[in-house]
Structure formats: C-alpha cells, structure tokens
Amino acid sequence: MIRLPVSCQTTGTAESKGECMDKILVLDFGGQYNQLIARRVRELSVYAEIKAYSAISPGEIAKAKYKGIIFTGGPDSVNEKNAPHCSPEVLNLEIPVLGICYGAQLMAYLSGGTVSEAENSSEYGKTELTVKGGKLFENIPQSSICWMSHTDYISMLPEGFEINAETEKCPCAAISNQVRNLYAVQFHPEVTHTEYGTMILKNFIFGICGCKAGWKMDSFIDASVGKYKEKLRDKRVLLALSGGVDSSVAAMLLHRAVGDNLVCVFVDNGLLRKDEADLVENTFKGKFGINLIRVNASERFLSKLAGVTEPEKKRRIIGEEFIRVFEEEAKKLGRINILAQGTIYPDVIESGRGDSATIKSHHNVGGLPDKISFEEIVEPLRDLFKDEVRQVGIFLGLPEELALRQPFPGPGLAVRIIGEVTKEKADILREADAIFREEVKTRNADKSANQYFAVLTDTRTVGVMGDARTYGYTLALRAVTTDDFMTAEWTRLPYEVLERVSSRITNEVKGISRVVYDITSKPPATVEWE
C-alpha cells in the first residue's frame, strides 16, 4: 500500500513559476541523499533545485537570487586531492548556507577549520544528539536522535564559528557562524531517522532564509501542459508506456497537452507481472481513449537476454531493445520525431548522473544506446519524486489504483530473476509474485508495507513433496516500509501471512522448493535485488 504524505502538494520547474518564487539551491557534492534534500524542501512548499557544485559559479548563484543554499553530503574526504570543492566565494555571497555531512566539513575547511579522519569516532546510524543552542535548533529538545554517516569530522573550528550540538563521539555535530549566516550539521536532517530533521530544515528555510511557502502542485500541471502545448505544437509524440505509475502519469499529462498527437506504445516484453499487459491495454485504450499500440515482443526480448547473468548488462540490453522497438513502431506510424519517457528523479540519481555514485542504471536513463533515431527525448516528470508523480496523477484524474501502484522496475522481472532470464523462470516468478501480492493485500498486511514483491534466486535446494525428492528454486520475498524509497526498513509482516504465502507458493507453483524472507534494510541493501 502506498501512502502519500499530507504535505505532498509541491513540485514543478523553476521557469514555470517565474523568478519571483522563493527558491533554495541544493549544491550537489555527490552523495546518495542529495535528491532527498530537495524533496524535503519541496514538501515544505518551497521550490528547490539541484545543481552540481561544478556546474554553477558564485556569480550565477548570486544572479539567480536564491534565498538559501544547502551543501549536500558526499562520499569523499575534503582533504583528498581531487575532492569536490566549490569556490570559497559561495560562502561570501550573503546568502544563508546550510552544510550537511560532507557539506558541513567542506564549509569548515573552506572557512579555515580542520577536518580530520575519525579513527575511533566514526558514526553510522541512529545517534543521540545533544543540542547546545543556536537558530537552527529553535524549539528542538536538548536531547534527540539523529542519523550519522561519517568517517571524517571537524576537529578544529574555523574562526568565528561556535558549536551548536554534539554527540558522544562527535564534538562538532553542529556548528554555525550566525554573523555570516553559515550553518553546518554533521548528521542528516533530511532522512526520517533524524527525529527533528524536518524542524531543523524549517528553521533554516523559513527562520533563517526567510522563504515563503508558495510552491503548489497544480502550478506544475498548468505550467507543464502549457509548456508542452507550445513546445510540441503540431508534432507527433511517441510515449514509452509501461503501465507503471511514472509512464502512466506522463501519458495523462502529455495527452492533456497534445491530445491525439500522442501515441503510446506498450511493449509486452514477457517480463511483466501476471495479467499486467491486459490491464494496461484495457485501462488506457478502453477507459481513457488514448492512442495505444500493444507490441507483443516477449520472444524478442528473451532471446536477447539468453545467457546473460550480469544485472547491468540485462538493463542495457532491455533499454536498447525498448528503443529499437519504439523506432520500428515510429517508422510504421509515419513521421514521429519525439520520444517521451516517464523518467523521474530517482531514476536519474541512481543512474549516476552528475557526480553521484552509480547504484544501478535505469532503462529510461543509463540504459539508452548511444545512437537513437528520434530528434528529441521529452521527460516531463524527470524533476519529480515518486510521491509528487502520484499527486500529479491524481490531479489529472488517474484512478488511485493506478496512481498509487507499487513501483515496478523498468526492466521488469528481468532484475527480479537472479542469473539468466528464461521464459520458464519468468512464468514461475509471475505466479509466485501474484500469490504473494494477493495474500498480503487480502490479509490487510499491505497497510504496513509500501512495496512488496518476490525474487527468484538462482539457488536450487533439495525439497520433498509426498514421497518424492524435489530440487527446485529458492524464492525470496521482499517487503519494505518507507516514505521516500531513498531509505527503507524491512517490513515486519505477520508470521501467519508469511506462513500462508510460503504454503501456497510451494504447493501451487511448480519449480519452487523453498521460500525465504529478506530482512535487510536500505541501506545497506537496495530495495531491488539487482
């Protein structure tokens, strides 16, 4: 079950609201929580945009009239030769700055302080924070829990700075120079594990930066429809419709903008969930009257994947094959120069755009081949987080059962089948996954899980059915609880639900002899197995 935050009425593009809108710059130094920072700011109805530290100069920052700047975390040490450093001039623009984790260390380093390796005092996970004072911590208790993840620490304060919070191992958990409006925290206020993280961000955005809440969801829709009506006037658009939340919302948005000039191509690649292909066709073609072409290409995709076991190679193959199918369909339809995709922010960051570490490639982003025949790729949702996309869908009239669907990877079951992908494995996983999702929903266990699915491992184990020995696959069940999919806790599903699921799968799905449950959170794991 997907639950939307109450405050989720925000997002859009800066140009859609004009330069009068208060906005925060999130300066990206390569961490994996960077997009989450922008999402937290947007949830407070203040626009945030992300720029790589190397992509914008101090002069451009000043000209853009940002109300505040947030330095993100990152995987490097500020003392390394090639560590990402912005110009020290950024700290002298008279714009309030908040440094987070690596960003805090960088602020101290650029201001003349010392950052050292924390030999015996590195911290990871939930940590008790003791507050000493300061504007950033107004109305926050003296003792609370924060989320730490660091190996370096600020060992000597820069001149003019004071300590505002500490932990048992970190004497400079928060520092500030209130005269220069510079603030830094070693922990991560953007993650839900930090007890008063939202309040800290509020204090910075509203109390220190003086922002006004003016960023609303309906403005994104109006601006986007207007933008694409003009940009795509008299042009035919081919949309890659998977039937997932992202491409479905993209289809609704672009259909409102260009009407019958939108053609949705739905590729049944043999890697979809049970009955999903029929659901997609009946919904968009039957209910919404959107131009839709269904391409049955399962044999084509499975033949391309034969013998392939490496996850990234699977994604690249599927990404390229999708594009080739779209190109072929475009030629059949006549002149279609625009390809539309449902790419969203998490796709971009996890594909390693900018300086962030690559976790996995998405077929929408990192899996595209070097040469494609379309003149332009349009991605109307690429600046949005998943919850924002869902809200756009609901505003556009997409039924909740579609708008609130669980995330499903672009490569489909291919990345939920460990090892080589075959038709036999896909059929086994389809049936097992359907049973798992059915039982969780039927028994109301979905209220505690935001995403749940099955993974077919490449491990076979001995089993016994009746008097016969079996040697079947091990199936893993995965369920997570999260509000942002950037971090996630494994869901404590009731034992009776897991028992029922295991019993049904081993009895009803031929080829599976053992069922296990994944109890790993994100981090250290990702939600998907591949």
Image: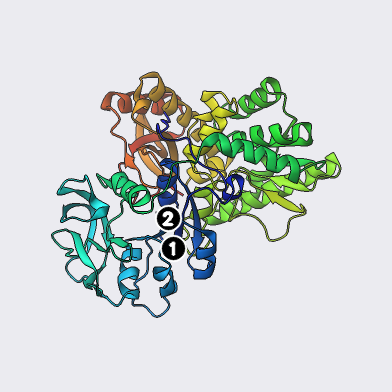
Q: Position of residue 117 (x, y in %)?
A: 24, 73
Separation of marks 1 and 2 at Cα, in angstroms:
7 Å
Residue 324's spot in the image, x, y percent? Answer: 73, 49
- Residue 260 is labelled as none
Residue shown at the point (31%, 51%) measured from the top left: 189
Q: Residue at x 64, y 25 (%)?
A: 278
Q: Amino acid at mark 1?
A: Gly
Return the mark for residue 30. 1
Where is residue 397, by image quadrant? top right
Q: Amino acid at mark 2?
A: Asn
Q: What SS does tag 1 mark?
A: loop
Rendered view: 243 above or below 347: above
Give neighbour class at mark 1: few <14, some 14-19, many 20+ (Cα, 10 Å): many
Q: Residue at x 63, y 36 (%)?
A: 222
Q: Is residue 133 above or below residue 494?
A: below
Vertical placement of 274 versus 303: above or below? above
The reply to whether callout 1 and callout 2 are in contact (CB within 8 Å) is: yes
Total marks shown come to 2
| Image quarter hosting the N terminus | top left
According to the image, label 2 marks what residue?
34
Q: Dot 2, how many residues are within 10 Å of its Cα: few (below 14), some (14-19), or many (20+)?
A: many
Q: Residue furthest right?
A: 334
Which residue is at the front of the view, 21 or 12?
21
Camera sees residue 57: no
Secondary structure beneath dot 2 equals: helix
